[in-house]
Image (cartoon, grey):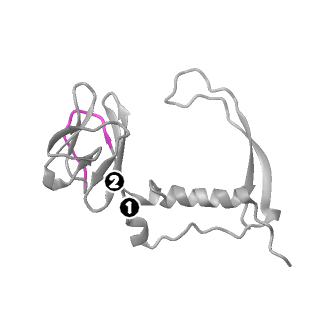
Amino acid sequence: MTAPQIPADYEAWRQGRWEEIAGAYGKAKVVANAKITDLGPHALPGIPGEWRTTEAGDLTVTAKAADGVRVAGGLVDATSPVPSGGPLEFPDNRVGLTGGADGSYGLVVMDQGRVERTGLTGVDTFPYDPARVFDGAKTNSGDPHPDSPSDPAPQQKSSCRVHMPR
């Protein structure tokens, strides 16, 4: 019996899944995830600095140079604005991303060495079996998302291919 020919799109999907988990901004590297939504100061566990939004709705961080916080490459030694989407760096090979506007921000901090330290080397899969591949169609309900405006989303149809393990 010969081994089945594995389609390129299946291999591409597996590689994409690994990148989603262990790539530069992979989920396995996340060590902190926070929301900053008020004027507050917010001390985030394991993350240096005090984080807050301003009256104008901008995100800032207050830190000492010894804390090692960098915003857009510059070392923070007082209070610094944190641009949404701009790069953040922390000690111990950690990096961060922010997103948001108008007083509501998210902060994600990743440890670039975490995947190697945990020993994660891949995502387990079942062997590819062409007899277990099914074609189908998916139609969304057209109902709006609870947080979206009241206009319903148009119904959309898409095709999909599913590999079902035994």
Magenta segment's dominant SS is loop
Badge 2 amino acid: Val
Q: Residue placed farthest to the top in the image? A: 151
Identify the residue at image location x=30%, y=30%: 103
Q: Picture quarter containing residue 79?
A: top left
Residue at the disc numbered 2: 95
| Front position in the image: 122 or 142 | 122
Rendered residue at 71%/70% (across/down)? 127
Given the image, on which type of amino acid does mark 1 rest?
Gln
Q: Quadrant of the C terminus?
A: bottom right
Give the vertical position of 93 relative to 104 (above or below): below
In the displayed image of the protein, which residue is found farthest to the right? 1
Residue topped by disc 1:
112
Report how far apart the C-alphas of labels 2 and 1 lie in the structure: 7 Å
Residue 121 position within the rendered picture, expressed as x and y whole percent measured from the top left? 51, 71
Q: Earlier in the sequence, mark 2 or mark 1?
A: 2
Q: Say few, some or many: other residues with alpha carbon within 10 Å of mark 1 (under 14 / 14 to 19 / 20 or more).
A: many
Q: Position of residue 40 (x, y in %)?
A: 20, 36
| Discs 2, 1 touching: Cβ within 8 Å | yes
> What count of labels does the image hold?
2
Q: Secondary structure at mark 1?
A: loop
Q: Within the magenta stretch, is there residue 156?
A: no
Q: Which mark is residue 128?
A: none
**Figure quadrant of the N terminus:** bottom right
The region drawn magenta spans: 35-45
Left or right: 130 as drawn, with respect to 105: right
Front residue of 44/70: it is 70
| Dot 2: element | strand
Specify whether 53 is left or right of 150: left
Horizontal and vertical percent position of residue 134: 79, 54
Image position of 107 with respect to 66: above or below: above
Q: Which quarter of the picture shows residue 39? A: top left
